[in-house]
Amino acid sequence: MTSRRPLSFQEIILRLQEFWAEQGCLIWQPYSEKVGAGTMNPATVLRALGPEPWRVAYVEPSYRPADGRYAENPNRMQLHHQFQVILKPDPGNPQELYLESLRALGIDFRRHDIRFVEDNWESPALGAWGLGWEVWLDGMEITQFTYFQQAGGLPLDPVAVEITYGLERIALYLQGAPSVWDLDWDGVHTYGEILKPSEIEHCIYNFELADIERLRELFQHYEAEARACIARGLVIPAHDYVLRCSHTFNLLDARGAVGVTERARYFARMRDLARQVAQLYLQQREQMGYPFLKKAPPAPASAPAPAPPTVETAEDFLLEIGTEELPARDLEAALAQLSENARTMFEESRLAYEALEVYGTPRRLVLYVRRLQPRTQPIETWVKGPPAHIAFDPEGRPTPAALGFARAQGVPPEALTVRDLPEGRYVGALKRAEGQPAAAVLAGLLPRLIASLKFELSMRWNGSGVAFSRPIRWLVALYGREVIPFTYAGVFSGRETRGPRPKGSPRIRLEGAADYFPAMRRARILVSPEERRARIRKELERLAAEVGGTVPEDPELLAEVGNLVETPTVLRGRFDEEALRLPPEVLITVMRKHQRYFPVVGPEGQLLPYFLAVRNGGRQGLELVRQGNEAVLRARFADAAYFYGHDTRQPLEAFLPRLATLTFQEQLGSMLDKTRRLEALAPAVGALLGLSEDEMRALARAAHLCKADLATQMVIEFTELQGVMGREYARRCGEPETVATAIFEHYLPRFAGDALPQTRPGIALGITDRLDSLVGLFAVGLAPTGSADPYGLRRAASGLIQILTAHRLRFSLSKALSAAASVQPVPVSREVLEEVHSFVIGRQRAALQEAGYRYDVVEAALAARGDDPAWAAETAGGLQRAVERPDWPRLLASYSRCVRILRKAESEGSLPAPAVDPALFREEAERRLWEAVQAVRGRVRPESPVEDLVGALEALAPAIDRFFEDVLVMHEEEALRRNRLALLWAVAGLADGIADLSRLEGF
């Protein structure tokens, strides 16, 4: 018996059309204009607007010029085909419908890994955005699934569900073809035979031939035509010209002719057109009376919620919030909030329990309360009334004031009591609020608890208007064996949970709360994030060890992957060793960023040709899942190799001119302008750091090249490889190692805990880059405000401090900032420089306090030495040790007495003499203090370490104390008084330039 032939490309389309037609979708046709995605077809972007219901499905050839690879990549090209579905309003089960459509194509979820991975989509050109997922099949994105929130800059009500299938990628899996060009189109022709020649021709045009100036002119003409159509009220013609603008922009982008600022302007122009078209379309439909509303079935009437049950004994309570797949970070945030908010609300409601626990997976948030008492705790409160002398007459009889108060509180007058309060004796009433049934309290509390969960990005999905991270699809609320009835987001609570996604999410009935964890274990769902991470970590270690390797520590990736699955199964895949010719950082970035794979390294830290992936499901079909993930990674590495090959055809320096198209900041110019400023500023920074001639030459060359990799294909695709690729490409084109290393190091540290630059040219270039950004961006009014810091200036200042303090480099901030100001293209006022100076010192203040230094110690050190961060840090360390000495209070008291008398004398108009005159000494204590000061002056100077100052104070303390015992400082004879003040001034001045001891506690 022969196996059935896989579906051809053509048959996949026909199957999907048939399936969605059966779901009530109108089968539309591809649009007549070139579009970048099926979203841009008016059947989506316009029909999604307004209140009318709409279900549609269609194929859309989608053109993305920059994605072309001259037909050299197995699954990336400038023309691909999407199958677009719009469901408006949300039918309540769109994920299930989508998964059923995949089954119609023959995809068996038990033998494959289907995943919904967060992807928040937006189209700046259309003013459209939505929240949803990429759908992965064995590691490859095959669909984008989005709940449309806005189109044409207008909110959507009702929300539309958009499902966009990647037809070529689905066909690759079904047919097992090694590349898209080998796909069977119709049983006779291959995909390559039909489309490969035109794909290559389009790439030649997109990347080599398209004339930039003519394209810019075309954009202006298309924009003008769109506006003319809008002025005449012509919706579809206007939309057509918006699409032509969009495709023209994409061609300009593929030609590398669009800088950051220019991109924003193009987007703004297209977004304005799209908004006007959207408004025109809505006006048109409104004038027509929204005819599709008349075809919509009436909404079903909602049934009233039943009364809360009666529970007489302490029972376990379960709340499960069943959702569509939550983003990993939202799951973590929701669990933290659920734990805190539930404890607070239960306490406020006087609900007593033995233990409260929270658990969660991508599809469920779980609150489990052990032995929840059946009634809330009773509470007695004493309500204060009138003063006792007003409430009772001299014979002790209640007055009208007492009677009125008792009546208002609902108690007999004889129940009133008198209490002595701080403000006097008052009458009051003791009132007791009896406990309420916990079930009734929960019915009102649970909707508020769910509503209290907040997310960075939330979405609407149905007519309830509720916003949540992702749609809520079921609610379980069981108190013992009883359902707590409530409704939230249009969902009624019940006793049915859902099983795992790979098994079709079967309904699982729970008879009681205590059945929940056994039911989850039977379904092989691990509801504990800690348990999932532990299992994944154990399997990672085992599978890596089998091939003689280990997995680098990556808690962030482990946490993310653990929050993407309910039933984790780790698999090991292999890739071609040929890929190891690429820099390891590139391979690791591809694995980690795009696929959430763990790399495997050998005993010497070298990358091995293996990866570890985590599947959501059991071991059935694991070999197929492994093969699929290997194929995905093969294509990803092919893309990286394409970028690498493209970039290495020319030296790194050749990319410099393209930096002119990348805007750093509109008033500060392009990245090329920034490069020129770094070249101008670097010598001054190098001189402040005392670099040698060889180091200065390396610094100058590195400053010239350090931003060039931003224009390379690899860094454009993987921005986190900036600096890494600069180093790699510098090495390849023969630059000295010191230059290549400095290019990489100038970005360090990139994040908390990152390595610091180690070479002196790298240190100097990193400081130079940060100084330029800080001064320039402050000068144009872009200082961080609140949580807004788009240019990462807090990170830049912190990095500057870290570098200087870690390497103990003496460095004047004020001189460096002035040098940075001199190379800016905009005026930099003294006020701006002072603002930047204070900002950097503020970051050091925070860093020192986080390191455990006392706040007053930090203030004392920064007040004197804040201009030199490393020196300030060392001073804070020495001063911290000093204040921890048992004799420190005595030393500080002696010194502070000198300073305080000087301040008091100055306020009274008495100033010290210009110099101490020993001839005016009258007391032995004066002479001894002067001798002691003379003895320490030689070793305590403004540049001395703080330890020398502390030693001097220790030596001076006895003489200071004796001085104040024997000498009257404020003598009536002016010469004596001023001489004695001068002596104290000599003591007080010892701390100048070292630390401001007056900032210390106890001064």
Image (tube, rainbow, N blue to C red):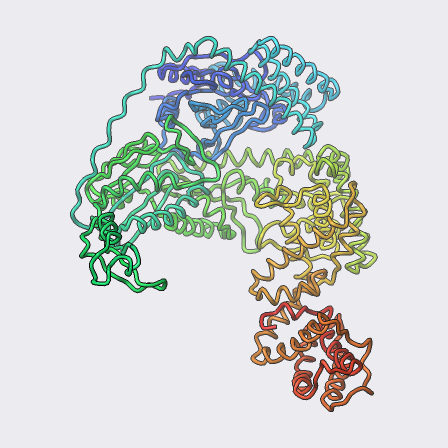
Residue drawn at x 73%, y 68% as measured from the top left: 993
Q: Where, by quadrant of the figure, is residue 913 drawn?
A: bottom right
Residue drawn at x 82%, y 75% as measured from the top left: 914
- From the viewer's side, name the closer residue of 544 and 720: 720
Q: Is residue 951 left or right of residue 108?
A: right
Residue 296 pos. (x, y %): 36, 14
In the depicted structure, whether residue 720 falls above or below residue 192: below
Residue drawn at x 61%, y 27% as measured from the top left: 67
Q: Is residue 624 visible?
A: no
Q: Is residue 786 visible?
A: yes
- From the viewer's side, name the closer residue of 126 and 635: 126
Residue 405 pos. (x, y %): 25, 51
- From the viewer's side, name the closer residue of 546 and 706: 706
Q: Where, by quadrant of the figure, is residue 92 drawn?
A: top left
Q: Is residue 973 left or right of residue 225?
A: right
Quarter of the image where the N terminus is located: top left
Residue 425 pos. (x, y %): 30, 63
Q: Is residue 149 left or right of residue 938?
A: left
- From the viewer's side, name the closer residue of 645 and 26: 26
Residue 667 pos. (x, y %): 74, 37
Q: Where, by quadrant of the figure, is residue 949 drawn?
A: bottom right
Residue drawn at x 39%, y 21% as measured from the top left: 89
